Image (cartoon, rainbow, N blue to C red):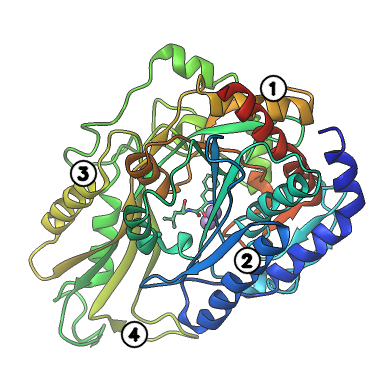
Amino acid sequence: MDNIKSYVLQHKDRFINELIELLKIPSVSADTAYCQDVIDTADAVKVSLEKAGCDHVEICETAGYPIVYGEKIIDPSLPTVLVYGHYDVQPPDPIELWTSPPFEPVIKKTEIHPEGAIFARGACDDKGQMYMHVKAFEYMIQSNTLPCNVKFMIEGEEEVGSVNLKTFVENNVEKLKNDVILISDTGMISNQQPSITTGLRGLSYVEVEVTGPNRDLHSGLYGGAVANPINILAKMIASLHDENNHITIPGFYDNVEELSLEERAEMAKAPFNLENYKKALDLNDIYGEKGYVTNERNSIRPTLDVNGIWGGYTGEGAKTVIASKAFAKISMRLVPNQEWEHITKLFTKHFTSLAPAGVTVKVKPHHGGQGYVTPIDSIGYKAANMAYTETFGVPAIPVRSGGSIPIVALFEKELKSKTILMGFGLDSDAIHSPNEHFGIFNYLKGIETIPLFYKYFVELSK
Ligand code: BES
Ligand code: MN
Ligand code: MN
């Protein structure tokens, strides 16, 4: 396998240009204005899998955006790796904060990426990371070193909750049968210190609506005499955390997995520099739940955050008005053993009970999913660690991430196999933010590391 390095070196420019072409298509799944672009991206992914060497590729229609499925079965008695990724991306807004247009990819050098990074929406999450697998597969085909069977399942609705993927998986258990699921849609500690994601948080996402008077009112004529939905909503939201930043919803923590002091001490060994963390975000201090450090607050602890809040007049100048309605979008990140639909119910019950007389409250559940933790003694984890050790020169550290890929827990339930999260992004890559980028180093290192995972997984499976 020594020549994966030279293959990458030789085809580097083409690999970058192909990714750039894919990034030019604005596959924003959340916004129907981009509908045709999302569909075009699925077609482009299909073509790339065919060119790379899949025997069979199809576009699987769903009630939403299609799933691209591809496979190369070399011998049914050999293990099968199922690669999952997503070709949809987050909306680019606020667009004015991008230093170059989000769908006109450019390579720029940064402090962390001195060899350059591709700036575009989806560069890291997840087109760049997904495409590493296509190119790693191309190499294994070209060099005749593919050691097992491969299946690809690339979806177009991850950023909007993978609602239709659930049905697809449930209806295609036999087709998707595999020995391990491989995903690159997470990050690692740094370009010097690889890590393997061993946990993902669950999610419950809701939208709330507080209604006061039946129309917007003059804030002088009515102010003080009727409930102002925006004031009330702010108060209700503020009461969802106590002075220790604990969440106040009754029953919220009931099933939360408590880690032992040993496990927490193990977690604390992962390199982390608080001063750099604050500096990277221009913060004068950190903030969070009492009794836990930053790396615990954003991984093993559940949270509640307002993602957006609106109502009333937000245009230029001042308008004296009491709005009829106020709204907020709220997400709760959950940890293992918290059941997301149960948490949604607890939230709804509590939030509704907070409403004073004078307003009415509606809670609309959006999507959600279960968290995930994976052991580090599985063949898959070991193979991934061996692969990283070989390409980075140091072993990977297991890290529980704060992000969510809800479909991972469903894969385990339906397909009965473990997922290995081999991420190559960095926190500073600004996924979901303006100026998202993916390091050229990371992209090429990913392509170099993935074939080694296949090699060691098959060896360890014997
Ligand atoms: N790739 C991310 C999740 C992620 C990123 C996990 C980095 C760990 C490290 C994924 O595309 C994502 O954004 N997921 C959403 C959830 C989804 C239901 C919209 C999230 O975490 O907000
Ligand atoms: Mn992603
Ligand atoms: Mn994402």
Q: Nearer the viewer, mark 4 or mark 3?
A: 3
Q: CA distance from mark 2 to mark 3?
A: 44 Å
Q: Mark 2 or mark 1, which is nearer to you?
A: 2
Name the residue tied to disc 3.
Answer: 249
Res 373 → quadrant: top left
Q: Position of residue 434 (x, y in %)?
A: 64, 64
Mark 1 neighbour density, 10 Å: few (under 14) some (14–19) many (20 or more): some
The secondary element bearing badge 4 is classed as loop
Count of numbered tags: 4
The three-letter amino acid code for the residue at tag 4 is Thr
Q: Is residue 143 visible?
A: yes
In terms of sequence position, does the residue under pointer 2 or pointer 1 come before the other?
Answer: 2
The answer to whether residue 205 shows anywhere in this view is: no
Asked if residue 418 is positioned above or below residue 21 in the image, the reply reads above
Label 4: how many Cα within 10 Å (few below 14, some 14–19, many 20+): few
**SS state under label 2:** helix
Q: Which residue is mark 4?
A: 320
- Ligand 2 placement by image quarter: bottom right
- What's the CA distance linking mark 2 and mark 1? 32 Å
Distance of label 1 from label 3 (alpha carbons): 41 Å
Judged left or right of residue 137, residue 369 is: left
Mark number displayed over residue 45: 2
Q: Look at label 3 and name its amino acid.
A: Ile
Residue at 38 percent of width and 15 percent of height:
260
- Ranked by sequence position, the earlier of labels 4 and 3 is 3
Q: What x and y, as percent, mark residue 328?
A: 32, 65
Q: Which residue is mark 1?
A: 395
